[in-house]
Image (tube, coloured by chain):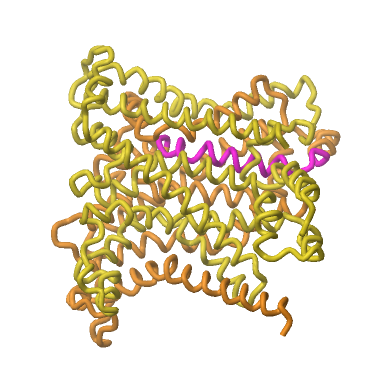
């Protein structure tokens, strides 16, 4: 049984370093400046630095920042695709939203879906990474093919699952029928009761291998000596996982969860392509509702106002996350 | 048998169980769509898993490639994804290098800002983006789609590359600077060769994002001039009478390029993520 003291040193050693050594979380290293590689640029070279970042900054300002600000402005107008003229309507869009049942339903679905998807991805990703960490025959091949689902277009993923979910000819129903579960067969994306859970399966299909590979990479950065020391103390597999592995990959978990909360909450194409938000709004989420309001009902102003609500929700999440992160960092 | 080796056997069995379930869940759907793409329409509709041999055919592929406009959309996708990859690499390599090596005023704010763009709902951004592209008269133009897709790619790509550059010792730059090279020479001849695996992963990322994009294309493309395969396979699979064999063939052709590229960078994809970590300890 390792001493509590040992965990904290292990945690610190990895906590401090891992940020620097892994590609993904590197954006967060602005926090511990002391670890950074100082390059000592000369004054004459300062201008070159600005020139280097100029193209990226211009593109992002023109196609991300400006659209964002413009979008915030549209939220207070009755702008439509059909009409060039528009006027400011104050808070009318927000009043409409308040009494729009589909908005509230979509909001609830969005939060539910994001929570379910991210929690399941995290748990399954950890299980997958733990399995891949074992040095067993065939594992290298498995590791090399498993991330394939992450690279194929979402539109293709949706078609695969749509096809498998078909009532008569879909593989899922064929298998169910062959094991004697014929009475529960259905078009899985067409039944309001199961369509949303089915969408969760699509998200998991795409991202769990990515979690697994990322966690595995972080696990491999943990020095073997920590595990050996724990083994001498007689710690079992579970104890080692809880006291060494989890603290060791803490930063990777934080980064993956943060990114995927944002990505899942903002994700549009899975649901739009699979169900369009149906049947009868059973899978409608905010991004899909905003898209349909903009491009199918042409209500850009109203859509923009719902988009700002999405942004506010994510900002609240982000602020809370930063608070927790800072508290965690200062406690360590 | 000692408890230690029993424990080891249990862990091995559990690991293989995870592997088998993963293969069924993550790989089988891809195998199934490839399998379906070689079956006749009638065969698919029998609902049988293993049909007689004479029900296998190449007809789905020949129809998709010769009767429909699919090759044209495939080419559109290829052109758009290639340009997006090139442009985004130029912007993000320079930007990430600048952020990694130079003293830039407000750098931390900029870095946080780039990360914060991941928070912006894309469905909100595309409303004004549509109007920007419209006012530049770039609707339904390849370059309009490209500019729109850049915003999907750039933030994450800069982030990846900056991380990669941060791990390359600054001594390399310094010795090259003493030799009298300018910043472009240093970047091209000193940094990029060392960062090649990271750059390859970044290029792969932008190609795959552009290739799979539906959101941007769906609002900026208005005709077959700029329509990409993601639009087309969606249309095929949303028609009233779905010809699953052909849909499957079109889907396979959509997947193949990404899987091919993936097989090239696959070892680097993992290596690109783990190399730094392994080097450190």
Answer whether residue B274 is visible to the viewer in this image: no
Colour of the chain lettered A: yellow
Q: Is residue A290 above or below residue A144?
A: above
Residue B105 drawn at (x, y percent): 67, 19
**Which residue appears at 23% of the width and 35% of the height?**
A102
Q: Nearer the viewer, residue B259 or B278?
A: B278
Q: Which chain is orange?
A: B
Expressed as whole percent of the image width and height from the top left, the position of residue A125 reads 53, 57
Q: Quadrant of residue A231?
A: bottom right
Q: Nearer the viewer, residue A121 or A55?
A: A121
**A69 displayed left or right of A83:** right
Q: Is residue B85 magenta?
A: no
Is residue B258 placed above or below B76 in the rendered structure? below
- Rendered-image quadrant of the N terminus of chain A: bottom right
User: Taking A156 as reference, is A219 left or right?
Assistant: right
Q: Is residue B154 magenta?
A: yes
Q: Residue A73 placed where, x, y %?
A: 35, 17
Q: Nearer the viewer, residue A307 or B135?
A: A307
* In this picture, residue A83 sits left or right of residue B25: left
Residue located 49% across and 29% down the image:
A59
Q: Is residue A20 visible?
A: yes
Total labels drawn: 0
Give the residue furthest to the left. B240
The residue lying at 21 percent from left, 26 percent from top is A99
Residue under the image location 40 percent in, 40 percent down: A265
Secondary structure of the magenta portion, mostly? helix
Report the span colored magenta.
Answer: B147-172
Location of the C terminus of chain A (image quadrant): top right
Q: Is residue A52 above or below residue A265?
A: above
| Percent position of residue B32, x then y | 35, 71
- In the rendered view, would you say A267 is above or below B275? above
């Amino acid at each position: 049984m390792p001493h509590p003291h040992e965990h904290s040193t292990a945690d610190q050693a990895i906590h401090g370093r891992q940020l620097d050594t892994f590609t993904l979380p590197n954006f967060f290293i602005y926090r511990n400046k002391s670890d950074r590689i100082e390059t000592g640029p000369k004054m004459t070279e300062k201008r070159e630095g600005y020139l280097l970042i100029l193209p990226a900054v211009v593109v992002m300002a023109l196609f991300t920042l400006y659209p964002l600000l413009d979008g915030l402005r549209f939220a207070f107008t009755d702008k439509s695709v059909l009409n060039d003229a528009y006027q400011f309507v104050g808070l009318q869009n927000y009043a409409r939203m308040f009494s729009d049942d589909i908005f509230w339903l979509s909001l609830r679905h969005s939060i539910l879906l994001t929570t379910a998807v991210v929690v399941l991805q995290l748990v399954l990703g950890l299980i997958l990474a733990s399995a891949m960490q074992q040095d067993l025959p065939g594992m290298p091949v498995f590791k090399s093919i498993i991330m394939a689902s992450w690279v194929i277009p979402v539109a293709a993923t949706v078609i695969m699952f749509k096809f498998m979910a078909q009532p008569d000819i879909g593989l899922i129903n064929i298998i169910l029928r062959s094991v004697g579960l014929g009475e529960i067969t259905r078009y899985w994306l067409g039944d309001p009761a199961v369509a949303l859970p089915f969408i969760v399966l699509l998200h998991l299909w795409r991202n769990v291998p990515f979690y697994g590979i990322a966690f595995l990479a972080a696990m491999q950065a943990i020095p073997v000596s920590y595990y050996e020391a724990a083994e001498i103390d007689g710690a079992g597999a579970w104890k080692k996982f809880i006291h060494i592995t989890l603290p060791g990959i803490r930063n990777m978990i934080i980064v993956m969860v943060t990114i995927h909360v944002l990505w899942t909450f903002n994700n549009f194409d899975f649901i739009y392509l699979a169900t369009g938000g149906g049947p009868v709004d059973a899978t409608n989420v905010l991004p899909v509702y905003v898209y349909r309001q903009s491009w199918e009902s042409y209500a850009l102003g109203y859509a923009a106002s719902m988009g700002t609500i999405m942004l506010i929700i994510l900002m609240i999440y982000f602020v809370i996350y930063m608070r927790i992160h800072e508290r965690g960092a200062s406690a360590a | 048998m000692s408890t230690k080796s029993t424990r080891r056997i249990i862990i091995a069995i559990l690991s293989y169980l995870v592997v088998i379930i993963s293969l069924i869940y993550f790989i089988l759907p891809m195998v199934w769509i490839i399998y379906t793409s070689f079956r006749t329409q009638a065969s698919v509709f029998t609902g049988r898993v293993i049909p007689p041999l004479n029900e296998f055919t190449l007809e789905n592929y020949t129809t998709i490639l010769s009767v429909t406009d699919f090759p044209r959309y495939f080419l559109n996708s290829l052109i758009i994804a290639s340009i997006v990859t090139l442009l985004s690499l130029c912007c993000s390599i320079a930007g990430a290098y600048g952020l990694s090596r130079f003293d830039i005023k407000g750098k931390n704010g900029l870095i946080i800002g780039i990360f914060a763009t991941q928070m912006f709902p894309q469905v909100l951004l595309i409303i004004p983006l549509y109007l920007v592209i419209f006012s530049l008269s770039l609707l339904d133009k390849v370059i309009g789609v490209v500019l729109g897709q850049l915003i999907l790619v750039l933030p994450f790509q800069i982030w990846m590359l900056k991380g990669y550059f941060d791990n390359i010792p600054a001594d390399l730059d310094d010795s090259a600077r003493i030799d009298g090279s300018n910043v472009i020479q240093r970047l091209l001849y000193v940094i990029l060769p060392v960062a090649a695996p990271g750059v390859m992963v970044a290029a792969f990322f932008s190609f795959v994002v552009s290739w799979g994009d539906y959101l941007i294309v769906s609002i900026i493309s208005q005709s077959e001039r700029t329509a990409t395969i993601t639009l087309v396979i969606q249309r095929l699979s949303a028609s009233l009478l779905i010809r699953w064999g052909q849909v499957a063939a079109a889907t396979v052709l959509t997947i193949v390029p990404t899987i091919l590229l993936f097989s090239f960078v696959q070892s680097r994809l993992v290596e690109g993520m783990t190399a730094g970590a392994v080097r450190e300890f």
